[in-house]
Amino acid sequence: MGLILSFMFELLFQKFDEKVALSSEEKALCKTFFQSKKLRRKQYLLQEGDPCKYVSFVEKGILRSYTIDEKGLEHIIQFAFEGWWISDQYSFLTGEPSFYTIDALEDCELLLLSRDAEEEMLEKVPKMERFFRILLQNSLIAMQRRIISSLSRSAEEKYQELVVSCPTIPQRVPQHMMASYLGITPETLSRIRKQISERKAGR
Amino acid sequence: MGLILSFMFELLFQKFDEKVALSSEEKALCKTFFQSKKLRRKQYLLQEGDPCKYVSFVEKGILRSYTIDEKGLEHIIQFAFEGWWISDQYSFLTGEPSFYTIDALEDCELLLLSRDAEEEMLEKVPKMERFFRILLQNSLIAMQRRIISSLSRSAEEKYQELVVSCPTIPQRVPQHMMASYLGITPETLSRIRKQISERKAGR
């Protein structure tokens, strides 16, 4: 955990401003509850079985959360890009061992909030209850969409939705990880991408 | 929308008490923001394409939310039993047309909260920001679990998880609806249930 410089909060405060009106005193107070952390590519933020002690805001980079099944296969739950939050909410709230592993797909700069720090921030800056309530509402909507997709969309439609939600994802995330997120094989994803590019080329 | 009698709030206040400490004045104030609604079995609470004007708390009965794909197949997103909430959060928050239909699987008694009523309640009883934040956190955890299951669990494991989460579901929800929720065919579910009962019988 390092010294936090003011510019590291730029994106976080931009996200706060979109949802709640904080005074400059409240912002200064909020800053004190976060810790900064840098991760290099492939480093772990959380390993399955450890308690998830922080919710992490991504200032820079990409992370993923995933679980490994009994056959050793990885299943990606979420990608988190700049401006997103990532955690195992269940483990964070209960202190139980995490179901996920979270690691960095690029070098990352994060702002971390512990459970105690969150509770204290919510007590001292009650407007943040509203911020987190809205944030959770939005996450829930995204999850509902994902469940609808997994039940009713074809693999190609699911891929197209993913790219619409994060247009830089094909450049920044390896193909086998996108396939894992979509619940399809890398070969199926490769065929889908070929079909899309052929259609675009008008063949 | 009918007259609301005090006993109709029993379950709701029990849920409030589990998460926040409200004074009796705050509870009395909260009551004024809800409307009551009764639905008979098969009646709609929300039809796809209409805006979702309320979040609904289930005092009695079961509802389901579902979407119908281009082939006319139903995909069940959620069941809501006594003590649960149901809505299309996206539509409720944005006023956009709903993606889901919500209907009653049994005769239901509901308490409805409109967007304006929710905003006014949050303003006058700020502790309710905390209640809804925690409620959303729990919904998010349930959704994360569901996504992990859909990616990594076998059909039988998914069925067993559903029954653990709502033990009365096999008695109260038709088999084809459970199959739709699990993303499997009714025939597959029927085979799974037969295998489980044969194993229980020690064959």
Image (cartoon, coloured by chain):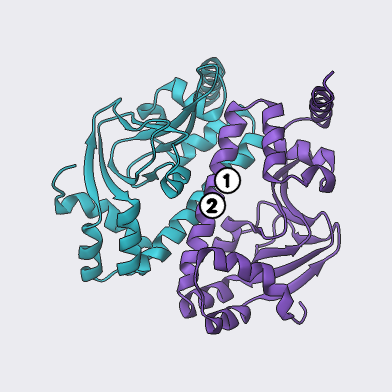
Chain colours: A purple, B cyan
Q: In percent of the image, x 21 and y 45: which residue is there?
A: B36
Residue at mark 1: A142
Which quarter shows the N terminus of chain A? bottom right
In the rendered structure, the answer to whether residue A199 lies left or right of residue A151 reads right
Establish if A36 lies above or below B96.
Answer: below
Residue at mark 2: A138
Secondary structure type for disc 1: helix
Q: Residue A102, percent across and down? A: 74, 55
In the rendered structure, the answer to whether residue A43 lies left or right of residue B191 reads right
Q: In percent of the image, x 33 and y 69: which residue is there?
A: B21
Local crowd size for mark 2, using a 10 Å CA cut-off: few (<14), some (14–19), many (≥20): some
Q: Residue B195, percent across and down? A: 56, 20
Closer to us: A35 or A165: A165
Q: Amino acid type of disc 2?
A: Asn
Q: In the rendered structure, the residue with mark 1 lies on which chain?
A: A
Q: Are marks 2 and 1 in contact (CB under 8 Å)?
A: yes
Quarter of the image where one finds residue A60: bottom right
Quarter of the image where one finds residue B148: top right
Quarter of the image where one finds residue B106: top left
Establish if B66 lies above or below A52.
Answer: above
Secondary structure type for disc 2: helix
